[in-house]
Amino acid sequence: MSRVYNFSAGPAVLPEVVLEEAAAEMMDYNGTGMSVMEMSHRSSAFQEIIDTAEQDLRDLMGIPDNYKVLFLQGGASQQFAMIPMNLMQNRVADFIVTGQWAKKAYQEAQKYGKANKIASSEDKTFSYIPDCSDLPVSPDADYVYICENNTIYGTKYKELPNTKGKLLVADVSSCFLSEPVDVTKYGIIYGGVQKNIGPAGMVIVIIREDLIREDVLPGTPTMLTYKTHADAGSLYNTPNCYCIYICGKVFKWLKNMGGLTVMQQRNEEKAKILYDYLDSSSLFKGTVVKKDRSLMNVPFITGDKDMDAKFVKAAAEAGFVNLKGHRTVGGMRASIYNAMPREGVEKLVAFMKKFEEENA
C-alpha cells in the first residue's frame, strides 16, 4: 500500500527520510549490533544520541547557554501541573485562555494557587487571539501563561503578549520548530513532540536556569521537579530513548532543509495555498479570524454536518486521512506540519475543488 497524506493533528506526519533512516537502523544502530529500542540509556552510544539531539536543537533555535533543554515524559499535559509546582512562589499566575489546552492548564493551576484568567477568546469559540497589548497582569503574578498555537481551533499568536515584566511561559506544542523564535522572551517554552517533531510520549522543556529551583511547592514529587532532570541531564530515570533518537533525526533533517527561516517560508507558502482556496470557495469556509490564522492547523467547515461527514469519508478514500475536526468542534481540520510536503496540500486543494463541483 502506498503512503497516505496524513493531516492528523498528532501523532502526526514525520519526514519520510527520517522514517527510512530509522528503518535501516532498526536492527543495528551504528554498528552496535542492536536497535536503539534495546539500548541502555547509560551507554556511550545513547549518550551521544541525546547530546547530539540537544546540540542540534540549540543550533536550530539559537538557545542561549543560560537555558536548559530537558527531554521529559508525561507529555505537555503533565507540564500543566509541573509548571505551577516549580514556579508558583507567590501562589499566583495569570492565564490567557485561547483554547482547550490553555483552559486545562488554567484549571490545573487552580490546585496550587490563585490562577487568574486575564483574557479569553471563549466568547467566540476560540476563533481569535485577544488583544494582549495592555492586560490586567497581576502585580504579584509568578508568570503569565499562553498556548501559542491552538491546535484544535487553528489560532496563533502573531505577537507575544505584553506581560508587563512578568515571566512568560508558553506551550508551543503544535508550532514547535515551525519558525524562528527568540527564546530569551520566555522563561519556559515547552511542547509535546508528537505534533511537529517526533513520535508520541515526550515533551521538550526549554527553561531558564534561574527558574530551576530547590524551593518548589511542598509535596512536589521528585520526578516533577525541574532540578531533578536538569541535574541529571534528562537521565534521572530511563527516558523515552527511541523518541529522543527520532527527534534527533528530525533536528538533523531541519538543519539539512536550511533551518527555521526556510521552514517558516515553506509553511507560509503551504498555508497560503489552502487559505486562499478556503477564502474563494462557496462550499468550504475557514473558522478563524484572518489575522490570527495558524500556519500549522487549518480548521474549516461546510456549515452542514452531513456534508462535513461526506467530505471526510470521501477524502479518506482518496488518501487524505485524519481530516475530521476535533470532537469538541466538529467540521474538518488539516494539520500541515513541517513534514507535510507542499504537494500534499496542493493535492488536497485539488480534491476539495473537485468535491465542491460535484456537491454544488
Image: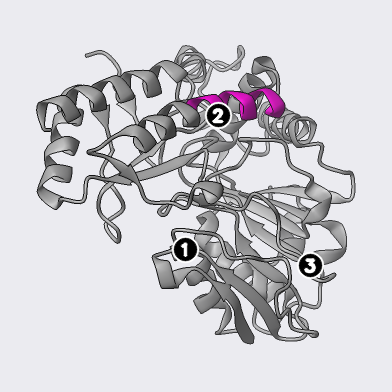
- Which residue does the numbered mark 2 point to in the structure image? 267
Q: Image check: 181 left or right of 77? A: right
- Residue bearing the label numbered 3: 167
Residue 265 picture quarter: top right
Magenta-drawn stretch contains 124? no
Nearest the viewer among 349 and 282 is 282
**On the rendered structure, is 55 left or right of 104?**
right
Percent position of residue 252, x then y: 66, 21
The C terminus sits in image quarter: top left
Q: Which residues are magenta?
A: 260-270
The answer to whether any part of residue 222 appears in the image is: no
The CA distance from mark 3 to mark 1 is 21 Å
**Rendering colour mode:** one colour
Disc with the residue nearer the chain's start (3 vs 1) = 1
Residue 264 part of the magenta segment = yes
Amino acid at pointer 3: Leu
Q: Nearer the viewer, mark 3 or mark 2?
A: 2
Q: Which residue is mark 1?
A: 99
- Separation of residues labelled 1 and 2 (CA atoms): 22 Å
